[in-house]
Amino acid sequence: MTTIAIDIHDVHFTYDGESFVLNGLNASIKPGEFVCILGGNGSGKSTLAKHLNALLLPDKGTVSVCGNDTRDESLMYLIRSTAGMVFQNPDDQIVTSVVEDDVAFGPENLGISTPDIALRVKDALAQVGLMGYESHETNALSGGQKQRVAIAGVLAMHPEILVLDEASSMLDPRGRKGLMRVCRELNEAGMTIIMITHFMEEASCASRVIVMEKGHIMADGTPEQVLSQNSLLDGLNLEVPFAAKLSKDLQDAGIDIPTCVSEESLARALSPLLTHVDQNASSEKTLAAAGSAQSEANQNQAAPDLAQVLPQADPLILFDHVSYTYDSAAAKKAQKKHKKRKPAETPTAERAAWGRDPEAVWALSDISLSINKGEFFGLAGHTGSGKSTLIQHMNGLMKPTCGNVLVKGMDLSDKKSLAAIRSSVGLVFQYPENQLFAETVEADVAFGPRNLGLSEDEVRQRVAQSLARVGLDVDEIGSRSPFELSGGQQRRVAFAGVLAMEPDVLILDEPVAGLDPAARRDFLQLIARLHQDGLTVVMVSHNMDDLAAYCSRIAVLNDGSLFLQGTPEEVFLKDEAIKSVGLGLPAPQRVAHLINQQGCALPVDRLYDETSLVEAIVRIRHA
């Protein structure tokens, strides 16, 4: 085995011949290391990743993979089988229409024997929790399920080095935990892991963290050395892990604790400093009262409150017992099979670990909910729970198999109403920049209004106004190609194209996926401003902190059914229910539970944000 897995020496690279994306980069990674690479959008992370398996070659300098120079064309096949890469967007990587064929594609190209390929496919699908999905069509999978297929396809090649470029950005909290578990197991077995991520909690689990900016390495060290540098990371449009941020808040409040990068270590550090709940008999009543309050907050958490499900007067969007299947014939067969199935045959270990039952054919099942004018409505659920299917019913892109969807009182099954509904409900898909298509920004944003038959003066006015609403100037970028813009600007242009239709409702499917922390904050603030301006907003997200901070009401889906709904506090206080469907808690609530589990007298019967959690800890410290 070589002493260096990856050797990067004085690497320069440019896409346009002028601006260097990598500028004199030097780094080496040893076999068996687990390295996280951080950096803002445009820092060069993904460009570097593509150099690690010869998808890109340096303009100057060298990259060696296990001693093999990536510029040597005769070694390219060996290099790409040595360093397997998973891209941020799984649609860039999936090449066949059936799951098992896609996972087998890499091993087949390596010349692996057919029996060994079958074993590799089975093992790889088991590792990512997709056993039972072998014959499923890849285009019918959710974004998170597609990402797990892409990961399985790389794992089936048995690479020595695994490179993950934002591979967890489309996964739900349970999926991210599952991916981290797989990475740790592979790393412990000797595989070199190189993970590019914007999730600081993932970076805290690595053995080494590298921070990039403008093609340079700005920091390199252990997670404790790098992730505690608030000022450095803030200056690079990054953020420290929540535990490190809370550590600093508590230090500023006069509590003497070290800066911790993991939430578990922070809870342990606080434990000896806080008042503990007495365990003697005299305190049993206090404990019982606290437990009773928490129990009441969590009661009936396995099913939604039916009173909350009932529509309010004149809802803007109403789902009335909506069910949907992509395959009606399969649904009928499944119903018959379900009646014959014994209870012991139903659950599987993989479903518990990763999510949806592969035999499930109802993407939505008996959904009844309402969304009211002016709401900021959040939608959460595990990968494959039906979130994207649900929102595509809101403007008629999909029609219910059973039940009805009404928008502003108009039934989507009425073809005469459909055009009016679609103009009033704007839908922004995952990676909205992929919706761009025109030669200029102005033409792209004008496409929708022009199709409404508006005059050219009205179209120009809408283009200028919608670009201004997303912080862009039509005079500066209107004549430019949208594909010349930065990723963040492209996403804003895509938003503007929807806003130019002047919708009453803005529906967003994971709108900040793949953005660095600074860009994520900017987009969430933009969405909040649009809501304050009068738009009704429906936002799908896997980020529990975003849902807790911005939404007035949240619905949680589980296997196509409505599982919970209510205010953020009503939903997130039902912590066991939330965890049972593969979701997590907002970071302040997670830390509160960890502190409480240390025996400290910190109540968990309220929903904390960062400020209120600091105040509660300080009160207990000085009690």
Image (cartoon, rainbow, N blue to C red):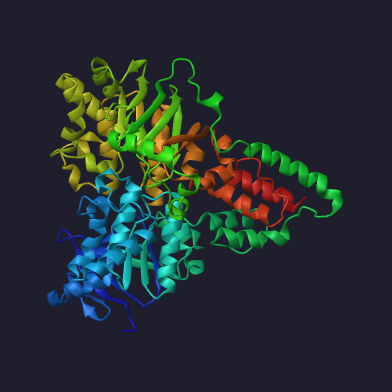
Q: Which of 20 and 378 is in front in this view?
A: 378
- Where residue 120 appears, as percent x and y from the top left, is 30, 66
| Residue at x-position 17% and y-position 24% | 451
Q: The N terminus is located in which quarter?
A: bottom left
Q: Where is residue 5 in the image (x, y as percent from the top left)?
A: 32, 77
Question: Is any part of residue 41 visible from this angle?
Answer: no
Question: Image point 27% across, 51% down: which residue?
Answer: 135
Instruction: Depth check: give the residue in front, 233 or 438.
Output: 438
* 581 sits to left or right of 395: right
Above or below for 72 versus 328: below
Q: Which residue lies furthest to the front in this view?
A: 340
Residue 212 placement: quadrant: bottom left
Outermost right residue: 282
Q: Which residue is drawn at 51% across and 63% down?
A: 228
Q: Is residue 202 above or below residue 508?
A: below
Give the x, y percent position of residue 506: 35, 30
